[in-house]
Image (tube, rainbow, N blue to C red):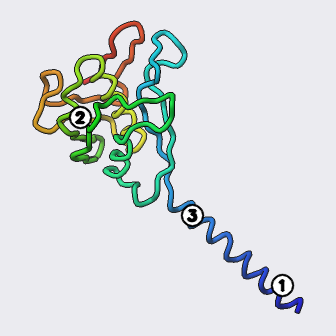
């Protein structure tokens, strides 16, 4: 009887670690950057906040992750900087560059709001991929009169005393 119990315990102990490794392999932790809610200039909270999420492995391709990102924030201190209905049309990652095409809803934003949205998206992409620049455009529309906005990893500035500026 003891042998059977010992054998069962040994089998259970061998199976359990395998189960936990499998569960960990099926999720990925990502950081999404959103507009701080509420925005308080010249404060510690700043303009952009980060939200950490755990996604299923089947959502871990760039298109799946960014689609989840565009669904909006899930915490109270973050709000989506994008207009309702904004969706991902295309994403591509090549060497040091990323290209993100969003639906035409993005063209509804201008100036400050557009800058915040693009910096939030770019910071999210920088965390996902080892790229140096993110080119953001929207389907069949211009962004502040330009066909696209390119933000480099070290080329964006958020000045809380004035309007956000995006690098090009």
Q: Nearer the viewer, residue 102 or 21?
A: 102
Q: Nearer the viewer, residue 93 or 45?
A: 45
Q: Quadrant of the C terminus?
A: top left
Residue underneath mark 3: 23
Which residue matches tag 2? Answer: 136
Q: Is residue 4 left or right of residue 63?
A: right
Disc 1: which residue: 6
Farthest right residue in view:
2
**Image spot of residue 135 (x, y percent):** 24, 35
Q: Is residue 76 left or right of residue 82?
A: right
The residue lying furthest to the left in this view is: 140
Observer-side mark, 2 or 3, equals: 3
SS for tag 1? helix
- The location of residue 119, given as percent across then percent down, is 34, 27
What is the distance, in whole Å, between disc 1 and disc 3 at their CAs? 26 Å
- Mark 1, Cα crowd under 10 Å, few <14 / some 14-19 / many 20+, is few
Residue 121 is drawn in which quadrant?
top left
Cα–Cα gap, marks 2 and 3 = 35 Å
Q: Nearer the viewer, residue 120 or 134?
A: 120
Q: Is residue 130 above or below residue 2?
A: above
User: Position of 122 compared to 111: left or right?
Assistant: right
């Amino acid at each position: 009887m003891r042998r059977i119990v010992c054998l069962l315990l040994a089998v259970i102990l061998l199976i359990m670690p395998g189960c936990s490794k499998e569960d960990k392999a099926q999720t990925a932790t990502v950081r999404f950057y959103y507009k701080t809610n509420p925005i308080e200039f010249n404060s510690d909270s700043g303009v952009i906040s980060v939200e950490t999420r755990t996604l299923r492995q089947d959502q871990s391709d760039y298109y799946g992750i960014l689609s989840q990102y565009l669904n909006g924030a899930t915490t109270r201190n973050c709000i989506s900087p994008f207009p309702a209905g904004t969706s991902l049309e295309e994403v591509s990652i090549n060497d040091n560059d990323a290209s993100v095409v969003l639906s035409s809803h993005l063209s509804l934003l201008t100036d400050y709001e557009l800058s915040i949205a693009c910096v939030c998206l770019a910071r999210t992409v920088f965390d996902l991929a080892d790229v140096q620049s993110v080119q953001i455009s929207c389907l069949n529309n211009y962004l502040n009169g330009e066909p696209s906005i390119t933000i480099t990893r070290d080329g964006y500035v958020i000045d809380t005393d004035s309007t956000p500026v995006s690098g090009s």
